[in-house]
Image (cartoon, coloured by chain):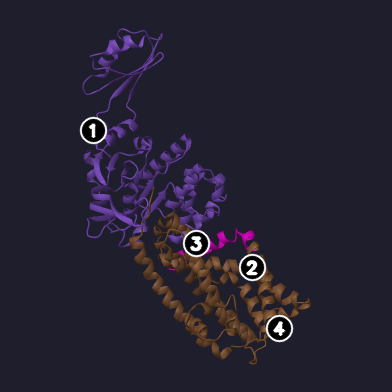
Chain colours: A purple, B brown
Amino acid sequence: MDEGLYSRPTMIQVEQLSKTYTVLKKKKGSLRRDREYIKALDHLSFTIGRGEICGYIGPNGAGKSTTIKILSGILHPDRNAGSCLVNGRVPWKNRLAHVREIGVVFGQRTQLWWDLPASDSFELLADMYQVPSGQRKERINRLKDELELHSFLHMPVRQMSLGQRMRCELSAALIHNPPLLFLDEPTIGLDAPSKIALRNFIRWLNREYGTTIILTTHDMDDIEALAGRVLLIGKGRLLFDGSMQALRREAGAEKRIVLDLASEPDPHSMRELFRGTELRLLEQNKQRLTLAFNPERLAATEALKMAIGNLQVADLAVEGQPVEELIAALYSRHNI
Amino acid sequence: MKKFWQPYLAAFRGRAKASLQYRSAALAGMFTQFFFGLILTMVMEAWYQSYTGSAPLPLSLHQAASYIWLGQMVFALIPWRGDPELQNLVRSGEVGRDLVRPVHIFSLWFIRSLAWRYVSVVLRFLPILIFSALILPHTALRSIALMPPASTAGLFGFLVLLSTGSLLSAAISVLISCFQFRQISAVGMNAIAAAIISFFSGQIVPLPLISGPVELIYRLLPFRYMADVPYRFWLGSLTLADLPAALTAQFLWLAILLVGGHFYVNIQLRQVTIAGG
């Protein structure tokens, strides 16, 4: 864990937070429904400092959205189960004061008036948050420039593309310049250029205003590009808290060597070649070989020497293990 | 300077603006009202002609027909179902979107419902007024046309009670929608509400024609205060002297529903579950 993160003043403090849902289950052929209790959050604790960008990850149903909903004051947690302070307040107790100082983007829902132009939504939201008229103009213009909204600002939201809409959603959540922003899968369904534009904007926002940002996503590129710190949860429990590099170490990340050979080798002889070495043959596809090694046990230069040694190599690349695989490995190790 | 109503005014403007987008729906609705008005007034005429009782009826045919036309004119103001936007919000889980706004949730929904009802009425009432009051008298159907208000005072009472009644109406439609927190679909709730509220507000049979135990029931319910009572001012069966009592009853009901609704919603939201992503 990075020391620096904890020297900041606290923005979010969660201690032993629990939330249980009741689900009604109907048995086949019976009219009776049984109650089942599902622990969405199970004594969850963490602290997030002001100005951090924090990635919040976990498989579907891990409790990510539940956490965001509790932190944003939408849901009440279980009674007498733990405590939670956001920006010095208990979210569900001081909802009105609390929500004035947070922004929320739910990637799968919209907060814009569907049949009105986004510009109308911005004005209405500025009124709702009582942004003084002087600041409002400057704020909206700033967002307009940074997110390049000019060309579609006056179009009804329903006619926008997803990328355009998501940029408007982000602006809408920021009209009142909240010190804390929750992003719940903001890049879901977006194409690559839109994702990159959105990430750049989030970085800019954090730098320019010191906004604390909590980001849930399944897109590990988002996390790698943005988050200095990652919280991994599963079954309502915190499984990992630290930097991306630490996560790689924790997951025992491998490095990979991809070789393009001059001619297609015999698969059997290739397997023989690397048998008993620190190099593992992951895949052979025509002329392309993919080898894996653990960088803790074998230095990259040694690995390269071993790999190239006896082969006619046309081209090569060394890469880290894709984060998706790391996460999948972590999920299965923790049995979630 | 911060004004506490600014966020609510914004909610009103937003809904009103959005509701104005649905002009063809308003047009379609209006034709339904023309059709219903004609059918109901013709049924009324047939019933009056076949009436053989000895006691005089409490309304003349012209009054009864006018009562029905007034009902069609302000039809969109009667909360015969929940607010569709709100019901959709509850069903889809987008309620969360409203909960992250710095406003009291019941007040927000109340204001939005009010905006929706106002726009719906404004889009619809004029053509029905022109048809029933200005065109029908020049046709063979003049006996079932809308008569002019009994007096200027009657018109005044009608307008005042209708505008305050709309508050009551908005409160009721929000409450109907909120009962849905406990349900999966709004269909059942809407069907029950439509039957009860249409009847007891006087939208189906003019309430002055009903006596006996049913009369007792409709007098005990709030629904007539946004329809039947204002109509009686137009017709002249209630006068300016009755206005204070009518306004008091409206505001009493409004207070009960607003306070009750506020608490009900807060309790429900404490237990609400918003599933998924």
Between marks 2 and 3, how big is the CA–CA gap?
A: 25 Å
Evaluate whether label 1 is on the same chain as label 4: no
Evaluate whether label 2 is on the same chain as label 4: yes
Disc on res. B124 = 2
Residue B73 on the magenta span: no
Between marks 1 and 4, how big is the CA–CA gap?
A: 90 Å
Residue at image mark 3: B187
Q: Quadrant of residue A303?
A: top left
Judged from the image, the secondary structure of the residue bearing numbered disc 1 is helix
Question: Residue A160: x, y in percent?
Answer: 54, 46
Judged from the image, the secondary structure of the residue bearing numbered disc 4 is helix
Between marks 1 and 2, how big is the CA–CA gap?
A: 67 Å
Up/down of A302 relative to A234, above or below:
above
Q: Give the mark toward the camera: 4 or 3.
A: 4
Q: Earlier in the sequence, mark 4 or mark 3?
A: 4
Residue at image mark 4: B49
Q: Is residue B41 left or right of residue A70?
A: right
Give the magenta-colored segment's residue range: B1-26
Q: Residue furthest front?
A: A29
Q: Foreground: B200 or A201?
A: B200
Q: Give the mark toward the camera: 3 or 1.
A: 3
Disc on res. A250 = 1
Quadrant where the N terminus of chain A is found in the figure: top left
Q: Could you tell me the amino acid type at mark 2?
A: Arg
Asked if the residue at tag 1 contacts the one at tag 3, i.e. Cβ–Cβ closer than 8 Å, the answer is: no
Asked if the residue at tag 3 contacts the one at tag 2, i.e. Cβ–Cβ closer than 8 Å, the answer is: no
Q: Earlier in the sequence, mark 2 or mark 3?
A: 2
Q: Could you tell me the amino acid type at mark 1?
A: Glu
Between marks 3 and 1, how big is the CA–CA gap?
A: 52 Å
Asked if the residue at tag 4 contacts the one at tag 1, i.e. Cβ–Cβ closer than 8 Å, the answer is: no
